[in-house]
Image: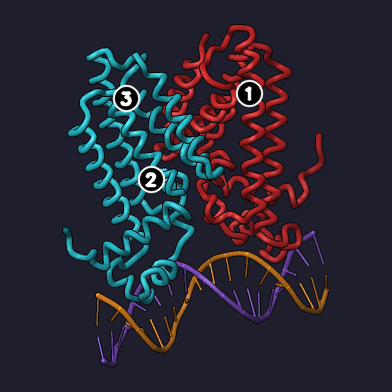
Chain colours: A cyan, B red, C purple, D orange
DNA sequence: GTCTATAGGTGGATAGAC
DNA sequence: GTCTATCCACCTATAGAC
């Protein structure tokens, strides 16, 4: 077992949830301070500026996401099963009444500092890269069928899942997300 | 020709663009005042609170959207052509580097006042209702094919388009949206 | 309807003691 | 590392003159 999470990690945990539920412009250091029972000033020791906190947030989120994708690769071999598990990650987020961190930031794109913009896109690039691999594998072994390039399908898939989760969350209906995700994946059946 | 837009309408025009590019939490009365060259206090005469402005914004947006849908019904008879034009409305928004007003608000759902939440969902309900009509028409005359209910397909469609536009805007690539939209509609070909 | 002036609050951020 | 104290910019909103 790891030691008790250090303060920086706990700050990130709280901030992550806040961004996923309220957006980067929808929370303040005061919110984190209250939840962690420290003063706002203490937070600035760990993350000098809010933009720094935001950047570290995306980095950690992507690292965790990439780990989850590696786990899928290790546990599943069938391409369609991999996609099913990929969608399940999203579904868990919706079930927790959250939005994908980077999906949320994509909406706030117009107000984000440059470093956060770049890291947000890097997250989507990583997602699409992984999906392209799975799609090509599935096309090769005839378990998945699609027209056009794997890259186009991957981008379409990410957009559909992000959009579905955004709207499902507004209705508080996980079923809405699940139905849309299942339908989207069904369109790739061989 | 209509007379010069009155002040309330001009405020709404400016605020609409601000919400679509920066989000409801990403702009202030000061931004509108600067663009309109009036003082912040003047704005409160027209919209006492920001929540009022937000509510009027959604109402007008939905009314304009519904009008656009009626125009599609009047000009096109083929169901697939209607869907094509529906997607074209979204595409124009992306081309203008904006996000759908209600798609943006869906992301900010967690911080919105109740009236705005309700009106935002009403917008999506209206979208889905119109789409259900088109889908049923297309299924009846064999121009569109899908499994499950028309309602499920409509919800999936709205989510896919909103998500695609959100991500495409972050990349500044209209082509990304167009490719995803075309692919989604292609999945409904009879 | 629009203005000046201002209230009252919150935002992110810093200095310096402990 | 965390605190107190504080700064200053900005926010939404109101009162009252014009």
Q: Circle 2 sits in a helix, a strand or a loop, which is it? A: helix
Q: Please say if A28 is above or below A94.
A: below
Q: Residue at x 22, y 65 (%)?
A: A4
Mark 2 vs 1: CB contact within 8 A? no
State the count of labels: 3
Q: Nearer the viewer, mark 1 or mark 3?
A: 1
Whether discs 2 and 1 lie on one chain: the answer is no
Q: Circle 3 sits in a helix, a strand or a loop, which is it? A: helix
Q: Which mark is residue B132?
A: 1
Quadrant of the image for the C terminus of chain A?
top left
Residue A72 is left or right of residue B91, and the answer is left
Could you tell me which chain the residue with mark 1 belongs to? B
Could you tell me which chain the residue with mark 2 belongs to? A
Q: Position of residue B101 (x, y in %)?
A: 58, 42
Q: Position of residue B52 (x, y in %)?
A: 70, 56
Q: Residue at x 78, y 48 (%)?
A: B6
- The Cα atoms of the two marked residues, 2 and 3, are separated by 19 Å
Q: Quadrant of residue B103?
A: top right
Q: Quadrant of residue B39?
A: bottom right
Residue A80 is left or right of residue B76, and the answer is left
Q: Circle 1 sits in a helix, a strand or a loop, which is it? A: helix
- The Cα atoms of the two marked residues, 1 and 3, are separated by 30 Å
Q: Please say if D7 is above or below B22.
A: below
Q: Position of residue B76 (x, y in %)?
A: 68, 15
Q: Nearer the viewer, mark 2 or mark 1?
A: 1
Could you tell me which chain the residue with mark 3 belongs to? A
Q: Which mark is residue A151?
A: 3
Crowd class of label 3 (few under 14; some 14 to 19; many from 20; radius 10 Å): some
Q: Position of residue B50 (x, y in %)?
A: 65, 59
Residue B96 is left or right of residue C15, and the answer is right
Residue that carries the numbered disc 2 in the rendered image: A102
């Amino acid at each position: 077992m790891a030691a008790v999470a250090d303060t920086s990690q706990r700050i990130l945990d709280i901030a992550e949830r806040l961004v996923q539920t309220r957006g980067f412009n929808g929370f303040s250091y005061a919110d984190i301070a209250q939840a962690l029972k420290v003063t706002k000033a203490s937070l600035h020791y760990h993350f000098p500026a809010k933009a720094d906190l935001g950047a570290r947030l995306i980095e950690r989120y992507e690292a965790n996401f990439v780990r989850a994708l590696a786990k899928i690769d290790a546990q599943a071999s069938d391409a369609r099963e991999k996609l099913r598990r990929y969608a399940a990650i999203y579904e868990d987020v919706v079930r927790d009444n959250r939005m994908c961190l980077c999906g949320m930031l994509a909406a706030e794109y117009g107000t984000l500092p440059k470093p956060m913009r770049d890291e947000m896109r890097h997250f989507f690039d990583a997602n699409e890269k992984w999906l392209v691999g799975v799609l090509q594998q599935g096309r090769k072994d005839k378990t998945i069928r699609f027209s056009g390039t794997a890259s186009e399908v991957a981008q379409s898939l990410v957009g559909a899942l992000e959009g579905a989760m955004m709207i499902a969350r507004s209705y508080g209906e996980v079923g809405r997300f699940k139905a849309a995700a299942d339908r989207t994946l069904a369109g790739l059946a061989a």
